[in-house]
Amino acid sequence: MSRKKKEIIATAKHIRIFEYVLFERDRQEELLKKGKFQYNAATKGIRAKAKLPILVEEVGEVAKVINEMSDQGIANDPAELKKELIQIAAVCFAWIESIEEDPT
Ligand SMILES: [Mg+2]
């Protein structure tokens, strides 16, 4: 990726959110090791067409949480929405990792 280097200042909030994603990324890797899935978005040799359903499933879970909100848009469980968004970010993180390792 060629981008002009720019100073980025991470706030404590940014770092906390990044940590949530890394913890989730690690949790997903542990689930893979325990055999819950055959592969994840970081697995080498898995094509994008096989990774997309992993991401779409997580997006669907966000949609479910939103669909279950009240008419005023209030989540029944705001923590659930946050959890599912973090899971999406972790899947994206894993997928980007695999692209970094093998851009083909
Ligand atoms: Mg989920």
Image (cartoon, helix red, strand yellow):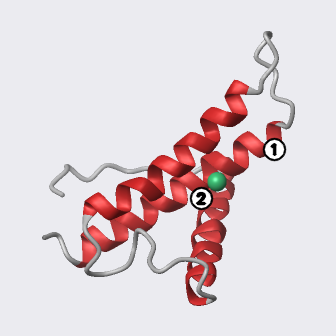
- In the image, is residue 86 above or below residue 29? above
Residue nearest the viewer, comparing 53 with 95: 53
Residue farthest toward the top in the current orientation of the protein: 72
Ligand 1 quadrant in view: bottom right
57 left or right, relative to 3: right
Residue for badge 1: 79
Dividing the picture into quarters, in which one does residue 94 lie?
bottom left
Q: Residue at x 69, y 57 (%)?
A: 16
Q: Which residue is mark 2?
A: 18
x 33%, y 63%: residue? 50
Identify the residue shown where x is 81% and y is 28%.
Answer: 75
| Quadrant in the rendering for residue 99 | bottom left
Three-letter amino acid code of the residue under disc 1: Ala
Q: Where is residue 8 shown, x and y percent of the image?
A: 43, 50
> Does dot 1 land on a helix, a strand or a loop?
helix
- Number of numbered discs present? 2
Q: Which residue is drawn at the image coordinates 19% and 50% (left, top)?
A: 3
Residue 102 visible within the image: yes
**Where in the figure is residue 36, as x and y percent of width and height?**
61, 79
Does residue 101 sit above or below 65 in this rendering?
below
Q: Element under label 2?
A: helix
Q: Position of residue 31 (x, y in %)?
A: 63, 79
The C terminus, quarter of image: bottom left
Q: Earlier in the sequence, mark 1 or mark 2?
A: 2
Whether label 2 lies within 8 Å of ligand 1 gets the answer no
- Check disc 2 and give the amino acid type: Phe
